[in-house]
């Protein structure tokens, strides 16, 4: 009988071994009868402990172990518990991200009283901000907070972006790339409060940031008008110089033509007149042309006068006028997004006016001719030509008008993720682009020198005058700046989820600024109106502008 029992035990062992051989598909706690046909029940596994911090913001309990507490009447020297809250949101966020004391686990959550916080807040991805809490009774509840959303946590700094959600390296304080839940908060940007001094941006998600915004308001103020472009000086540019007179006949053995005069402008450019032609016995010399000569000159501006030969000399021609700077183009495109918000486009700067050409030098004369000569004992050379006058300098240009400030509720940069749930998004009006600056009047070209006189009473020919220098060109008027954007959600790559109950309101974009010195109805050189939309996609900073 014992032997039989032993054999039975052996068979059971073999059967159990066979069962265990296939245990890769069996639960570890299971046991089986000899023939594996009966599986014995596992003991029930214990239920995992409930997370006391879990739940939705409107119903989850507010416990010290679950978050850091902040209220207007707190103190940043406190530990941030319900009974001893801190005062500022940013300090509460630091405690939630790092723990209240050394070695304590970070709570990753901030409970904020309903009330007004006049500070700009940077929130790392993974740290939650649950606002709108009723704190007066010490319960820090949401449901009893005067109807929750009717008593929100208002983040409204006088200057700066009310709410930033950090991601990537910027969000390293949170220790991961988790999504931040923002609930019961009003982020309200003041007019023209961004770092450019003219835009209003309520919320920015930096690269890689992740946020879920629920039962909140995100409201941007108005953008400011762009600044006018700088006008060029109101006085004229440097005038040209008076040409030098040629010497009279019979006063020098070698009557050298008058030397040129030069105007040096503030940008280093020059206008140089032509030499006067030398006086001679039988012929006078030609003058030289004024500079700078036009590339094409069919009108003969600034060419030199001819010296006397069989015919009297000719005067130098007047120099050409300097080129006008004209009118520059107004700003075009849509601008781009960066960590500070939106950057618009300035109007184009005007072009500098060109220097006027110097006048050509007058031709020299001669002393000998039929029944004509210098008296014996005097120098015998004929009269020398006068040099041209130099041209005026070109006027300086106006500077382009500045872009108008934007009104953008939310800026979402590359690789950010945003979900909006029952949230009100408001953008108001963009500022108008600034008017372009006006150009400067060019300097006046001066007259050339007089040619030397022939010997009085003999009928001897006089030398010829130099030409006038040309006036400098007027400096160009600048273009107007781009109007400011009016956008609800401005983004680069669309990682957006907009859930029911979310509304977006958008005002008007700013108009483009007019060009300098332009009539109010003159569209030439006017900047474009700013971009507008409930949602608007901007190109990445490495993309060409559109």
Image: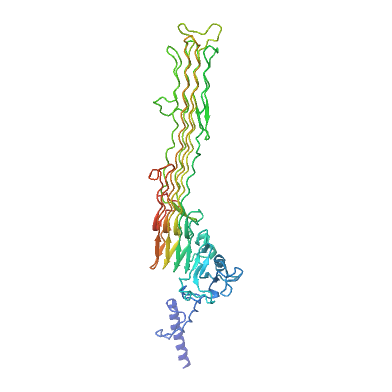
Instruction: Return the x and y of residue 426 as percentages of the image width and height.
Output: 42, 62
Query: In the rendered image, is residue 179 in sight?
Result: no
Instruction: Return the x and y of residue 310 as percentages of the image width and height.
Output: 43, 11
Instruction: Return the x and y of residue 195 as percentages of the image width and height.
Output: 51, 55
As displayed, is residue 5 above or below residue 482? Answer: below
Query: In the rendered image, is residue 381 in sight?
Result: yes
Residue under the point 57% across and 68% down: 87
As displayed, is residue 92 above or below residue 191? Answer: below
- For the image, the number of numbered tags is 0
Outermost residue, front side: 457
Instruction: Return the x and y of residue 284 as percentages of the image width and height.
Output: 48, 14
Residue under the point 48% across and 49% down: 227
Query: Foreground residue, 480 or 121?
Result: 480
Residue under the point 40% across and 28% down: 296
Colouring scheme, one of rainbow, by chain, secondary structure, one colour: rainbow
Query: Foreground residue, 411 or 234?
Result: 234
As displayed, is residue 51 above or below residue 92? Answer: below
Q: From the viewer's perspective, is 232 left or right of 508?
A: right
């Amino acid at each position: 009988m014992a032997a039989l029992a032993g054999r039975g035990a052996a068979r059971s062992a073999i059967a159990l071994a066979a069962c265990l051989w296939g245990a890769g598909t069996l639960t570890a706690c299971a046991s089986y009868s000899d023939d594996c046909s009966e599986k014995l029940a596992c003991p029930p596994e214990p239920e995992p402990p409930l997370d006391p911090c879990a739940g939705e913001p409107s119903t989850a309990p507010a416990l010290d172990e679950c978050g850091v507490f902040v209220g207007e009447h707190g103190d940043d020297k406190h530990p941030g518990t319900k009974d001893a809250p801190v005062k500022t949101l940013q300090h509460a966020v630091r405690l939630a991200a790092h723990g209240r004391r050394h070695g304590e686990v970070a709570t990753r959550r901030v409970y904020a009283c309903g009330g007004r916080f006049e500070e700009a807040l940077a929130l790392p991805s993974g740290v939650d901000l649950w606002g709108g809490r009723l704190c007066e009774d010490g319960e820090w509840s949401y449901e009893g907070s005067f109807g929750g959303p009717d008593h929100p946590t208002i983040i409204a700094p006088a200057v700066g972006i009310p709410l930033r959600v950090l991601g990537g390296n910027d969000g390293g304080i949170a220790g991961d790339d988790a999504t931040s839940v923002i609930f019961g908060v009003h982020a309200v940007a003041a007019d023209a409060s961004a770092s450019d001094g003219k835009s209003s941006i309520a919320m920015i998600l930096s690269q890689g940031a992740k946020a879920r915004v629920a039962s909140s308001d995100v409201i941007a103020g108005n953008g400011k008008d762009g600044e006018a472009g700088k006008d060029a000086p109101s006085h004229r540019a440097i005038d040209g110089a008076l040409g030098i007179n040629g010497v009279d006949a019979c006063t020098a053995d070698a009557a050298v033509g008058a030397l040129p005069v030069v105007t040096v402008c503030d940008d280093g450019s020059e206008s140089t007149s032509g030499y006067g032609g030398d006086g001679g016995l039988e012929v006078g010399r030609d003058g030289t042309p004024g500079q700078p000569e036009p590339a094409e000159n069919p009108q003969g501006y600034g060419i030199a006068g001819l010296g006397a030969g069989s015919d009297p000399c000719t005067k130098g021609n007047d120099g050409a006028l300097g080129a006008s700077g004209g009118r520059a183009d107004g700003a075009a495109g849509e601008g781009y997004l960066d960590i500070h918000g939106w950057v618009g486009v300035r109007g184009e700067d005007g072009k500098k006016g060109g220097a006027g050409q110097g006048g050509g030098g007058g031709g020299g004369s001669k002393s000998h001719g039929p029944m004509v000569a210098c008296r014996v004992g005097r120098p015998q050379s004929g009269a020398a030509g006068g040099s041209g006058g130099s041209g005026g300098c070109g006027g300086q240009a106006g500077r382009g008008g500045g872009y108008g400030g934007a009104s953008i509720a939310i800026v979402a940069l590359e690789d950010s993720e945003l979900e909006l749930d029952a949230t009100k998004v408001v953008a108001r009006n963009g500022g108008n682009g600034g008017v372009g600056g006006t150009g400067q009047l060019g300097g006046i070209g001066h007259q050339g020198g007089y040619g030397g006189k022939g010997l009085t009473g003999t009928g001897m020919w006089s030398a010829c005058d130099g030409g006038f220098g040309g006036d400098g060109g007027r400096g160009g008027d600048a273009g107007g700046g781009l109007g400011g954007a009016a956008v609800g959600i401005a983004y680069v790559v669309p990682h957006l989820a907009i859930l029911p109950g979310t509304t977006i309101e958008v005002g008007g974009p700013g108009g483009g600024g007019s060009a300098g010195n332009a009539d109010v109805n003159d569209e030439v050189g006017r900047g474009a109106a700013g971009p507008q939309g409930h949602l608007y996609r901007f190109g990445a900073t490495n993309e060409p502008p559109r």
